[in-house]
Every structure is written in C-alpha cells, then in structure tokens.
Amino acid sequence: ESKYPRHGGNLKTRSTELGSAVTGSSLTTVLPASTSVKKNIVLSSESRKELAKQAKVIKEERRAQIDGRHRYLISRLADGIDLSEQQVEETIISDDKFQLIEQFFAPNGLKKLLFFYQDILQQKSNASSRPDGSTDNLPQKKLFITMGSTEDFTGTCAFFLRTSDEAITASNVSQEVNFGMFDCTNGNILQGLEFFLSQIMIPALKSQQNWGAVKEGLKNSQIQEFLYSVDKFAGTLSSSRQNIEDKIQLTKVDIDIYVTNLQNPSDYITA
C-alpha cells in the first residue's frame, strides 16, 4: 500500500502485476517444497531406524546386567501375575524406569519398588487415521515400573519392600526384600487394600511365632494392641467402602403438587 498509490486505474494495474508476481513466485517454490517433504519422510524413517537400533543396544546392555537379584524379582512377578519369566524380563529391560531397580538395590536405596499390571490404551499398529486425525485405541494389559504417583491405578499392584538399608545382593535378596500384591481392578483401591490386610496380612501376623526381641510373642500386651489396631483399621476400610458403594440416593420429588394446594394451616400439617 505504501509502494503503490491508491488510484483506481493504477491500483488495478499494479494489483494485477503484483498478483502475477506472487503467483509466479509461488509456482517456483512448489517443487522444492515437495522435494523437502520427501526428504523429511526419508529422514524420519532413518531416525526411527536409528532410535530402534539404540533401543536394542540399551536392552542388551540391561540384559547383561541381570543377575540373581533381578532373577528373584522376575520370578516373584511371573508367579504373581501369571506371566512367563521371559515376558517379565523383556518388559523390565524395555522399561524407561529400569534405573529404579538399581536404586532399590543400592545401599540406603529406595524403600519400595512398584509394578502396575493393568489395561493401557495401545494404538493399533495398522490403524489408519480418521478424517479428524483420531485413531482406534485398544486396551491392552501391560506390566510397567512406576513411582505410584504419576499413573492412575486401575489394575494389580505388585510391590517389593526393603527391610533394611543394607545393599541388596544375590545372596541376601530373599531375606531383605518382601514381595506382595493387591488387586484394585476397576480402581477399587479400598476393596483391594481391605482384602490384602484381612485375608493375607492379618492371618499371617496372627500365626507369627517369632516376634524378635518380644519373647512372649502373641501374649505380649503390645503385640495384642498392635493386632487390635490393624483389625480395627481393616474394619474401618470395610465400612468406608460400604458407605461409598451404598451411598444414599434421594429420589427427586415434584413438590408443586403439594405446594399449590396449601390454603390453610391444616393443609400445611397434612403436607
């Protein structure tokens, strides 16, 4: 606008010339653009191959690190989740959080190591995008390492707990690490924890014979008080779950038929 004066004849002529110039320049840039797209596709394919190659190298490096400690974890997970040990091993060495296992084994390391086994939305490998860009996603069960605070918990939790700050070795892993599971299918965490305590932990505690320095065992008043507290907590979980499941649902009532007929005090009493 600053270059060409705003006059009818000149504007029409200049606009036509400018349009021709722009059209011409656009045509000259189409071919390089399409060539660039092809290059990007080739580079993208090469990048994917390189990433896959790197991932394979990392997996093999991790596989070489697996020793008796890892084998103990793998065997417990395979037994509890009904997967083969080979499947569990492949899952672990492919997991982005593999380093958490090493942190769990280290002296004064992580106190817990968590695994979730639950449905994860997976995109079909042969799925084609819809016009709106969306694709079909199917739920598929997956085992993965987690910190427990970043993913929704909707399936089964398998956990390992340390009993001391000592370094976990192949010789002491079975004594220093405890394994447990609880099922929270469909996100029923209260029900899963209640079952874990009432059906597994409390019976195990009540049958415990060796209480360390407490020689009286179950006859000791502190032990009895502890077991009572755990029983009470499990009962609280049960009542909380029932309150949530059986919550009061108030029926919606049309009060107009009662209000419109109120004429005198006796009508109010009847209502």
Image (cartoon, rainbow, N blue to C red):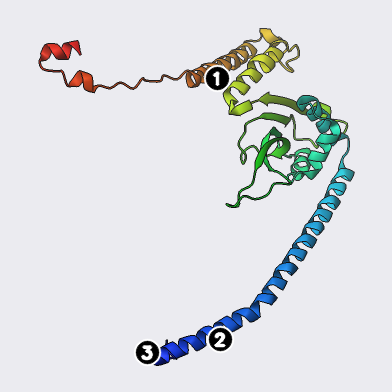
Say which amino acid is labelled 1. Answer: Leu
Q: Nearer the viewer, residue 150 or 15?
A: 15
Mark 1 touching mark 3, by CB under 8 A? no
Q: Label 3: which residue?
A: 8
Residue at numbered disc 1: 237
User: Which label sits in the foreground, 1 or 3?
Assistant: 3
Looking at the picture, does residue 170 appear above or below residue 45? Answer: above
SS class of the residue under badge 2? helix
**Circle 3 sits in a helix, a strand or a loop, which is it?**
helix
Q: Residues within 10 Å of mark 2 (few under 14, many from 20)?
A: few
Of residues 261 and 193, the one nearer the viewer is 261
In the image, 243: left or right of 62? left
The answer to which quarter of the image holds residue 144 is top right
Q: Which mark is residue 21?
A: 2
Q: Residue at x 70, y 46 (%)?
A: 127
Quarter the C terminus occupies: top left
Crowdedness near tag 1: few (<14), some (14–19) or many (≥20) residues, C-alpha within 10 Å: some
Identity, as a three-letter code, of the amino acid under mark 2: Ala
Q: Give me the residue at 68% from left, 39% from top.
A: 146
- Mark 3: few/some/many CA within 10 Å (<14, 14-19, 20+): few
Residue 142 appears in view: yes
The x, y position of residue 162, in whole percent, is 74, 31
Q: Please give left or right for residue 122 compared with residue 24 in the image.
A: right
Secondary structure beneath label 1 = helix
Q: Quadrant of residue 167?
A: top right
Q: Is residue 15 above or below residue 241?
A: below
Q: Residue furthest top?
A: 219
Residue 110 percent coordinates (x, y) = 71, 38
Do the numbered discs 2 and 3 sit on residues whose CB atoms are within 8 Å? no
Query: Which quadrant, please, contains the N terminus?
Result: bottom left
